[in-house]
Amino acid sequence: MGFDIVPLPYSEAFTALQLGTVDAFTGGNNDIYLEYRDVIDYAVQTRDHLDIQPIAINLQLWESLSAADQKVLEEAAGATLNWHWDSLVERDEKVKIELEEAGIEVINLTPEEMGAFAKLVREVEWPYEETVIGKILMDKVRATAEPIPE
């Protein structure tokens, strides 16, 4: 896609942008771009990152719960995550407007560019992520991911 990627500690991103050590960043949602509005000129919409916080429980504690209690917690967690997802999608659209109002150019990838980006992520990043989070979770990602734009 024409980018030279350099890993950088997130805590250093603002200063690196401010000093011109790096030209841009990725790995955050539009709220992060908005926080960086004083040091960025554009926000490329790769749609590859939308923060949604996981709900976790200690396995030993989970296994000590009755099946009925596990079901209640699973349903509550699912409802919470669905609400969070919906609110983030809505918030993301509002922040795009705020970015433009702040003078940030919001760049939406063409279907061809999005397809190239998605293909690269699936070929390179997904196999790595499987080593981090495991096959079960990555299979869920694969099952729910949108098809690559043609």
Image (spheres, rainbow, N blue to C red):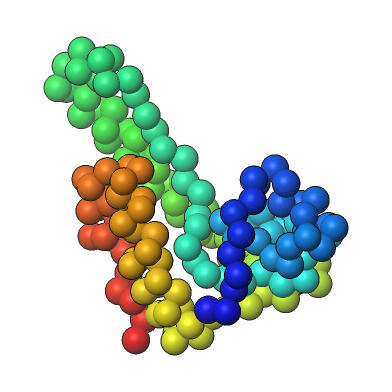
Left or right of 144? Residue 121 is: right
Q: Quadrant of the C terminus?
A: bottom left
Residue 136 higher or lower than 38, as above or below: above
Q: Tell me if residue 29 can be seen.
A: no
Looking at this rendering, what residue extends furthest in the left direction? 67
Q: Residue at x 82, y 63 (%)?
A: 20
Question: Can you give x and y, in whole percent of width and height, for residue 6 in the image?
Answer: 61, 59
Q: Residue at x 45, y 85 (%)?
A: 111
Question: Can you give x and y, in whole percent of width and height, for residue 27 in the image?
Answer: 56, 56
Question: Can you give x and y, in whole percent of width and height, for residue 78 in the image?
Answer: 32, 40
In-front residue for pair 106/67: 106
In-front residue for pair 138/84: 138
Task: State the image quarter where residue 126 is shown.
Answer: bottom left
In-front residue for pair 7/122: 7
Residue 82 higher or lower than 109, as above or below: above
Question: Can you give x and y, in whole percent of width and height, for residue 34 in the image?
Answer: 72, 58
Q: Residue at x 70, y 43 (%)?
A: 11
Left or right of 4? Residue 84 is: left
Residue 2 higher or lower than 40, as above or below: below
Q: Residue at x 47, y 46 (%)?
A: 52
Left or right of 72? Residue 126 is: right
